[in-house]
Amino acid sequence: MKVQNKFIKNATIILLVIFTISSTIFLVSTHEKGEMRSYEAGTNEIRISNNQLSWNLESISVTGAWELTNGSKDIIVAVIDSGVDFSLVNLQGMAWNNSAENATNGIDDDNNGFIDDHLGWDFVTSDNAPYESGSYWHGTNVANWVKEVASNVSIMDIRILDDTGGFNGSFWPEIVNAVNYSINMGADIINLSIWNYGTSPTSFHQILQRALMEGIVVVGITGNTWDDPTTTGVQYPGKFPEVIATSSISGNGLKSYFSRSGSENEICAPGGGLAPVDGRLASGTSFAAPHVSGCFALMKSINQSLSPSDVRSILTSTATDMGTPGKDNDYGYGLLNVTNAVRGAAGLPTWNLTKTTSPTTTDVSVTTTTESTETSESEVSTSDTSSSTTELQSSSTDTTSRQTPFLTLELTLIILVLLWKKRK
């Protein structure tokens, strides 16, 4: 019996040691990955989620918004660009479908002037296939970041850019027709990650005015300095007052070196050093804009009665101020804050969110100084490795919390050794 009791005691001690070590490893690995804690202002409520997001989604605070909505298929984001490859895994199920059109009968079933336009329209080749094999990659990447923010909305695919990602001045009538198509087919948000040299024609401005009057939110870009280094300021169509001009930040939490500044700049979002759906590291204000479009899609999903002015007001009032206090030319009203924008749309109080990003987080690994072989839009910004302050509190920066499990293990082992000796 004594042998049996001794065996039970020894086995118990061994199990306690294994349990302690296992618990410690779990705690350490959790802290190493980074545990995200968000605190609701005026309450003791704490929400915790694993830090598995890319740096750009972390920086705009999306997780709190996803607790309320991931979007609605009734909300349509028109991506007017170079075509979207919906065959890619990350974009499957995201395509808008024109239910009034039979895709294969060769008849304009809904009498809108476009035959078999079940997914959208290609205004370059005048057919119902906006994306074809070999199409320019730009539109697919734009659509990807709409989806990453709002994973349950519909993306209307409209092509206006050629296989080089550009268009010439003679193509303006078709661009106007493309915006008109998105209005007539029920888009809620139009994403225009495009720019042009000089001014845009009056007809283009007028169709954007019509979009606004129809209750459609139009998101554009401030433009990139590499596109036209001889000029300064925000480029058209972002310069139009009807368009929400979006500038770019990079992984260091600062304005991207390529991002244009100007008084028309309304909001900033991540656009420097992104790794999109096709694995191509890309940079440009073009990819900052769809983060904003995705946010608007979530806002409209939770409150479809919002007007463009409502959306704009919530956006600017909930943005995280950056740079010079208040609105400035580099960051506009500040960094997009998806959680607070969606809470504002839902009529809920906003959260007071802060975040300290450690130099060892994904900010550094994502925004490497890699040269891309693509055109200017895919060039990659250089990110420094300094800490930056943005939106959520990451416990991975708390060195005390990392040390605590080790101290617990050491004390437990000491106590077990003392008990063992006392038994002898």
Image (spheres, rainbow, N blue to C red):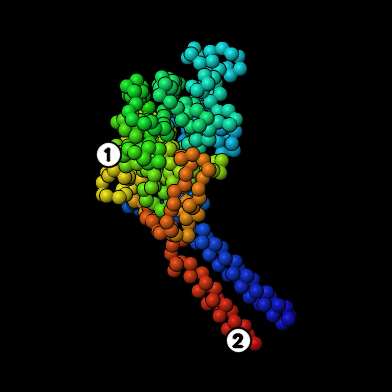
Decide: is 117 above or below 402.
above
Helix, strand or loop under label 1: loop
Residue at 47 percent of width and 26 percent of height: 160
Helix, strand or loop under label 2: helix
- Is any part of residue 48 visible from this angle? no
Q: Quadrant of the N terminus?
A: bottom right
* Distance CA(mark 1)–CA(mark 2): 77 Å
Mark 2 closeness class: few <14, some 14–19, many ≥20 residues within 10 Å: few
Mark 1 closeness class: few <14, some 14–19, many ≥20 residues within 10 Å: some
Residue that label 1 marks: 263
Tell me the kind of residue under disc 1. Ser
Tell me the kind of residue under disc 2. Lys
Residue at 50 percent of width and 28 percent of height: 162
Residue at 48 percent of width and 70 percent of height: 403
Decide: is 119 above or below 321.
above
In this orientation, which residue lies closer to the viewer: 96 or 117? 117
Residue that label 2 marks: 422
In this orientation, which residue lies closer to the viewer: 186 or 24? 186
- Residue lying at the far front of the rendered structure: 230
What x and y, as percent, mark residue 365? 50, 54
What x and y, as percent, mark residue 417? 59, 82
Residue 29: quarter of image: bottom right
